[in-house]
Image: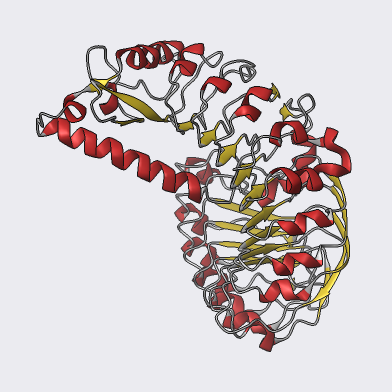
Amino acid sequence: MAGTTHLLALFALTQLYSVAASTSDAHAHGHDNDTASSFCHPDQAAALLQLKQSFILDYSTTTLPSWQPGTDCCLWEGVGCDGVSGSSSNSVTVLDLGRRGLYSYSCHAALFNLTSLRYLDLSMNDFGGSRIPEDGFERLSKLTHLNLSYSGFYGQIPIAIGKLKSLVSLDLSSLHNIESAEITNLYAIMDGYNFLVLREPSFKTLLANLNNLRELYLDGVDISSSGEEWSSDLAKAVPRLHVFSMAYCKLNGPIHSSLSSLRSLTVVNLKLNGGISGAVPEFFTDFLNLSVLQLSYNNFSGWFPWKIFQLKNIRVLDVSHNERLSGRIPEFPSGASLETLILQYTNFSGVRLSSFNNLLSLRELGELAPFFSWIRSLKNLTSLHLSDCYSSKLTPPMIGNLTNLTSLEITYCGFVGQIPSSIGNLNKLTSLRISDCAFSGTIPSSIGNLKKLRRLEISYTELSCPITTDFGHLNKLMNDLRGDIPTYLFTLPAMLQLDISSN
């Protein structure tokens, strides 16, 4: 998810690097056995140097300084090797260049000479809008983990990747770190890009030989050509799947009942597809290991299966922005693991204080209108969004008691009077948004206490006073400050954007 954690990939990388570390340790201590004293295979060292030369290091944020001719490539940064007993050289099994800001016009063919690779991560680099090579990946037949996410690849995903039968984890995501504040404009933003697509080969064809997959991340990949068959195709092709994240894939239609066979699922992320419809499947309650269920921004309808709330391992539950989805919140069981609950723009009802008595781990709570007094007991909350709270005119005074909050949004509420000064108690806040409310009078000077704020928005209110000098203390403020701005605010050292529109 893009929020989900690549646990299998992390475990595999740890194991593979432990082999490399033991080999490197043997180098350092001068052991005499062939495996310990051997360098990496010279052909593989040459391939890695070719790959380095393909990056435009003037534009890249790293220069791979340890990658030098004549040195052991098994000791180079991002490289791991696995020695073979009796061999005079070690084989490169790990290439981890993720998040290094490397830039190239394309993926160099030298990569495919590293045929012993088991773990390949090129994520968070920039390959200049090029296509994933049509030929080459089939040569990396030992790959168990492949991550090409967020690296500027566009166009059709090649069938060569579908031939990697040993893959356990595959990440081709194109959608990264979309904040909730940007969601309202998401579709307009994303439609302007040519993302990775699955047309020919299709989604079904790509997965046909990948039946060992445990993790599949395709966020932002256009899979619309699969029609309403995407869920049945998934169930048939990858029976051992634990994690699938397919946010903003332009999926549509109901979730097929055959998906119920994937009993090992721990993470299901289908948010931002818009066209997924029908009921939230009752069989989700049979996924006893389910920890993350993200279904927001779709077209689900009917009654939400209440037993999902009571799954022992559920940590993240987000079904927001499904306006035809209804349900009631039952009492959570003792020892409940829920950390994130987001239900805004749904028709949930029946919220009682007793429902939340056992949610000791809750960190993030999306709007549940109207505001309920039980929120005062959720002392561990780090994120709170109040929206559409028109039934109450008074701001809940207990907000100032939620001192672990790092993010607070109050939008489209009927609260009148002044913004409560107790907001100044929330000294861990990094983001504060108050918009489309009936607040009037002055902005409380206590906001000047929020010295960790990086984002502040106060817009579409009845406030009529100028911002006071207390705002000069907000040295970490970065963007979206709205109101009457005194000139000294332009000296805030971290400010990147100032918005004074709609006042």
Q: Position of residue 214 (x, y in %)?
A: 59, 47
Q: Image point 14% across, 29% down: which residue? A: 33
Q: Nearer the viewer, residue 381 or 129?
A: 129
- Up-down: is 357 above or below 134? below
Q: Image point 60% across, 71% down: which residue? A: 338
189 sits left or right of 397 in the view: right
- Up-down: is 92 above or below 340? above
Q: Is residue 177 visible?
A: no
Q: Position of residue 4 (x, y in %)?
A: 58, 51
Q: Is residue 26 visible?
A: yes
- Up-down: is 492 above or below 389? above
Q: In the displayed image of the protein, which residue is found farthest to the bottom? A: 354
Q: Nearer the viewer, residue 383 or 174?
A: 174
Q: Position of residue 451 (x, y in %)?
A: 45, 58
Which corner quadrant of the image does residue 126 belong to? top right
Q: Nearer the viewer, residue 338 or 283?
A: 283
* Display coloring: secondary structure
Q: Image point 51% across, 13% down: which residue? A: 108
